[in-house]
Structures are given as structure tokens and as C-alpha cells.
Image (cartoon, rainbow, N blue to C red):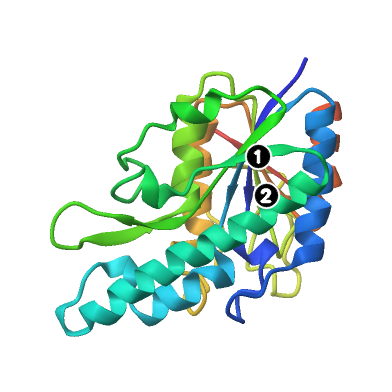
Amino acid sequence: MAAKVIVKLGGGLITDKSSIKTPKLDIIDSICDEISNLVSSGNSVIIVHGAGSYGHLLARKWSLSHGLKKNISEQQRKAVEIVRNDMKELSGLVSKSLSDRGIETTTFPPSEWAKNTGDSFKGDVSVFDSFPDNVVPITYGDVVNVDGKPEFGILSGDDLMARISIEIPSVTHCVFLLGDADGMMDRPPNLEGSKLIELWKSGEFVQTEHDSEHDVTGGIELKAERASLISEKVEEVWFINGNFPERLSELLSSGTTIGTKIVS
């Protein structure tokens, strides 16, 4: 039976988060090879991607996640427009890679259809379920307008994943592709002796480390929270190493792969 898969491409997977606007084109292409294979096999795919070095560095410099600040409001508003344009550019790289493989895409910049932040943001996600199976809709974490004095804020791709996965009834798989680990680890993956957790549910303790220097949206903790919410609705919710995108096909064909399955 054909699957409907929502795939999150982590910003740290498809860009070098330490250097502004530095895409990992080889990684993007390898993932798009795999997505092309999935679509060609009759599966339906929706892509959400992170910002990485196209958003987080500038957002952190001008405190965009905290909303408007009077003393730097002019610089912040300029930064908002730059980040929005940069995110369209990054999404264009993903779209072009798929197009080069014969896959039609449609991109939805959140700044044009979503408002407010968190998983209760305003915006109709049903549009992502309105395309033929051979068309791949794309959206991403972005700076969006916010009600009230903050004026703007950052809508995380993880919150988009949650809403789309929960509100579209036909979703069968929700997969977060990570850039630095095989899945959720029992301690930060850069620490010696860290081990893969093959099955995880909300409330189970995991020692994590948030890279606040490069990430302004919550890191692995937010992913885990949103994945746990999704698992209440979607049976197959996974964290997988995006450097091995072939694990997506393995998951769909065999029901398992190297990674972490999130259960409710």
C-alpha cells in the first residue's frame, strides 16, 4: 500500500550551521534522490525543512525569536526581510534538486500563509493534502507575523511538522532526518559512549544538549516534544540519520530501519 510520508530535513543536515548561507548540496541531492525514488514508487511525500545557516545565525544576532525591540527595531525589520528571502533561496535549492530529478514541487513560504508561533499557529495546513501524489509540497521554518506588540516571531519547522502530521488524516509516516546522529541518543551524540535509543516515548529521560549558539528554535528537545504529539495520531514516527537517506525506503519496505521510533 502506498504511504503518505512527511519528511523533515533538519537545518543542520542540509546546511553548515556555523557559516552563513552555506548549503550542503551533496546532502540535498542525495536526499532528493531518495525522495524521487519514493514518489516514483507511488508514495506521496510532503517536505518540511529547517533554516540552518540561512536563518538561525541572523535570527540570533537580532533576537528575532523574541519579537520587536525598540532599540533595534529598524535593524530587526531589515533582518526579517533578509531571513525570509534567504529561506526562499534555500527552499529553492531543495525544489531545484527535485525538479532535476523530474519531480514537480510547490512551495509554501510560511510568512505568506501562517501567523503566530508554536504548534497552535494560525494557518490552514489542509492545502498540503490537496495535490496529486506525484507533486511534492514544500514548506519550512520561517519568520512570520505575530499578533500584538511582538510583530514577528519564528515559526519552527517542527511545529509545522506537528500540525501537518496531525491534521492531515492520511499520513502514514512522519520522519525527522537528523544531521549528526542515527536517531535519538541517550546522551549528546558528540560524547563518547553515546548509544542509540531504538524506541522512545515522552517522559523517558534523555541527556540532551541544545546548541543555542546556532539554533534559536529549541533543538532536539522541541523535536522530541512534537514527535511525541504526532505519535498519538501517526503510528510511524521516526528520527533517522539523514546522511543515510536510503533508510527511508528501508523503513517503508520493511517497517523498520536504523533509527529511533517515537511511540505514544
Expressed as whole percent of the image width and height from the top left, the position of residue 230 reads 51, 34
Residue placed under numbered mark 1 in the picture: 105
Is residue 218 or residue 199 the one in the foreground?
218
Coordinates of residue 126 in the picture (x, y in percent): 45, 26
Q: CA distance from mark 1 to mark 2?
A: 6 Å
Tell me: residue 139, above or below residue 135.
below
Determine the secondary structure under disc 2: helix
Q: Dot 1, crowdedness within 10 Å: few (<14), some or many (≥20)?
A: some
Q: Residue 34, position in %: x, y?
A: 82, 43
Under tag 1, what secondary structure? strand
Q: Which quadrant is the N terminus positioned in?
A: top right
Label 2 sits on what residue type?
A: Ser
Q: Is residue 69 above or below residue 140?
A: below
Q: Position of residue 20 (x, y in %)?
A: 58, 79
In the picture of the structure, the residue carrying the numbered disc 2 is 95
Q: Residue at x 72, y 52 (%)?
A: 96
Quarter residue 25 falls in: bottom right
Label for residue 223? Answer: none
On screen, residue 131 versus residue 254, left or right, reads left
Task: Tell which circle, 1 or 2, labels the residue nearer the N-terminal end.
Answer: 2
Q: How many marks?
A: 2
Q: Are marks 1 and 2 in contact (CB under 8 Å)?
A: yes
Residue 17 can be seen, yes or no: yes
Q: Nearer the viewer, residue 37 or 77?
A: 77
**Res. 43 image quadrant:** top right
Does residue 258 appear anywhere in the picture? Answer: no
